[in-house]
Amino acid sequence: MIEIEKSLLGCILSWDNKFDEVFAELDPGDFTDGRHRTIYSAMGAIRAESEAGQVDLPLLTNYLRDNDLEMPAGDPPYVYSLIDSPTVPAMLPDYVAKLKEASALQQVKTLMKRVDADRPAMDILASLEGEIKEIRASTMRTDGFVSSSETMKEVNKELFEVRESSRRYAGLDTGFNDINSKINGLCGSELTVIAARPSIGKTTLCLQIARNVAIAEKTGIGFFALEMSRKQLMQRLTCMEIGVSVADFRAGKLEAWELEMYEDALPYMSDLPLFIDDTSGMTIPLAKARMQNLMKKENIGLWIFDYLQLMEGEGSSENEQVNSISKGLKAMAKDCDEPVIVMSQLNRSVETRFDKRPQLADLRGSGGIEQDADNVMMIYRPGFYPEIQKKWKGDEKIEEKSEILCLKTRFGPTGEFPIKWDTDRAMFRP
């Protein structure tokens, strides 16, 4: 590896126009020899300071001397031996690739030495996930750019798939036409936030969307349940499906016809491709590891997190933690190219308003959620509040009145639309 490093540095000194393509790919830390790290760092500094923007042997030797950078004693100086190394410009990409490979391998070995064998495997994976991601990214930096020609193939494919289908939106079918219309369906790489005050129906709406997507798109759903247990979620979803009270179901108070409906629905509910992880204190690295593991086994088309403020993020304040979580969720949506829905609580400012109508500023924890999200929808149920019920004079039942406020869409107009709350079945209807 030492000889490859010498050849690469000698190539830069002999063919100065090759420096920029190397400098974009390698860091000083990628060199194994301390002398070469020093020389490569000096080359970068010279390049930045030189009016002509060049690096040559006299400039390098002067810079090393003037900055008291230690080099092995000798006459001629060590840097002159670099010129004597084989310098083949055509081999430069190969030199860079070998150095990056060796650097990545060394970084992985260093990480492995720090692994505590007494810790659970998933804890080790979660703690190392970020550093492994950085190593992978630095090793594959040359693959970052994609030509407009390749990208337009993807754009063209999506356009004609939508045109040839019976529907007029590109993403997954949520089962709610107004939602599909507003956000173009649930599209890959997009983060959608569904927010509301407690007990308004965030989990209910997301369960309905999960069920609809699973059936319409014949795809699996990964559901991270941080508030409820997986059993509670399936109880609620089953009650919505057969039209019985959750309280009665949990108490076993089912009429004969209701029990018959349940028994008929049991095989169907068992076959639903809904995969629930109800681990408490979920972190972004751990969630990503679980997602990657599930994707190896199942065809997953949608990820749902219930809910953001119950996840554990990085930072000393709530704002910093929420920021780190929302950025992590958006990054995961991009990395897996699948839609991600995250539920979010709203702060108490909603309760201080007469009409209890939520706003973007009510997102609890940080404006980072609004910034990172592609779509933000809020659920508004005025009938939930007794003070509004008492003064209601509309024609429809206030208990059933509900709206979805689409307050942010990255690729379309905002707006709101009515949606009915079914009080008997505790679910939403288009």
Image: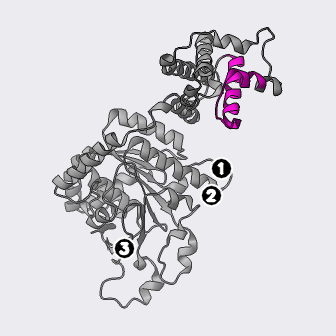
Could you tell me residue 301's position as x and y percent?
32, 45
Quick one: quadrant of the N terminus?
top right
Q: Is residue 215 among what the camera can see?
A: no
Q: Callout 3: few (<14), some (14-19), or many (20+) C-alpha neighbours within 10 Å? A: some
- Looking at the rendered structure, the kind of residue marked 3 is Glu
The reply to whether the magenta stretch includes residue 263 is no
Tag of residue 319 = 2
**Tag 2 or tag 3, which sits nearer the N-term?**
2
Query: Label 1: few (<14), some or many (≥20) within 10 Å?
Result: few
| Nearer to me, 15 or 125 | 15
> Mark 2 belongs to which amino acid?
Asn
The residue to which callout 1 is attached is 315
Horizontal side, residue 45 vs residue 389: left or right: right
Whether residue 75 is situated above or below residue 26 in the rendered picture: above
Does 228 sit left or right of 187 as displayed? right
Secondary element under disc 2, as helix, strand or loop, is helix
Q: Which residues are magenta?
A: 33-62
Residue position for label 3: 416
Label 3 to label 1: alpha-carbon separation? 35 Å
In the picture, which quadrant includes the C terminus? bottom left
Secondary structure state at the residue bearing disc 1: loop
Measured along the vertical axis of the image, is residue 134 above or below residue 211? Answer: above
